[in-house]
Amino acid sequence: MSRIIMLAIVMLTVAAACSGKKDDCPWEISDRGVVIDGITWATRNVSVAGRFVSRPENAGRTFTFDQAQTACPEGWRPPTKEELKSLSEAESAKITVNGINGRLFGGGSGCIFLPNSGEGKYYGTYWSGDTHVYENETFGIALTFDDHSSEVFANVITYKNSDFSVRCVKK
């Protein structure tokens, strides 16, 4: 019986920590963006080229690497591989917002939610604006995370014709 009580206490503590993290992050939808580690990130994904989705938990549409390079609204651009690396090293946690799984990056007034956007909504992959050349073939670089791991991987080298989300940074 005491093991059940202890398990219940642990589960409640974890749930409180996750919900507290979300509550600490202002969910203001702003065209100004949010600063994390000196980089101004958009608060929402790209919906269609030149436009953001209406809510942070909306995944938006996916783009090939070449499409992603011109998808951001005016005044914004895809992040560099260094900026994705910086985001991947920021404080982060897996959370659910309005029934959508994803990852919260940053803390306090500087945080953003990146929704899972991949097939089946079990992972999120986001394009950078940088490429990598290997054996005369050019690949795109992306950031990725999933529901089964606490790790975030930046600088993932992938085929440019893959369809991934775009989260912009200020120019």
Image (cartoon, rainbow, N blue to C red):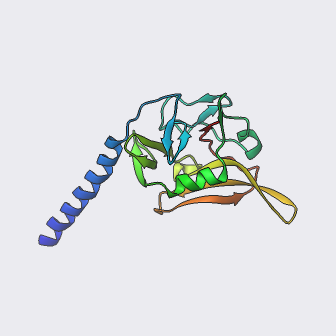
Residue 110 position, x and y percent, is 43, 42
| Image quadrant where residue 11 sits | bottom left
User: Can you say whether 106 is above or below 57 in the image?
Assistant: below
Q: Single out the residue that lies furthest toward the left.
A: 1
Task: Decide if residue 28 is on the left or right side of residue 114.
Answer: left
What quarter of the picture does the C terminus occupy? top right
Observer able to see residue 67: yes
Please give left or right for residue 122 compared with residue 67 in the image. Answer: left
Q: Which residue is pictured at 65% across the width and 60% down the height?
A: 156
Image coordinates for residue 140, horizontal then vertical, percent:
73, 53
Residue at coordinates 55% horizontally, 54% vertically from top-left?
Answer: 86
Q: Nearer the viewer, residue 130 or 60?
A: 130
- Relative to the observer, which residue lies in front, 17 or 108? 108
- Viewer-proximal residue, 99 or 30? 30
Q: Quadrant of the N terminus?
A: bottom left
Relative image position of residue 164 (x, y in whole percent):
65, 47
- Residue 4 percent coordinates (x, y): 17, 67
Total count of labels:
0
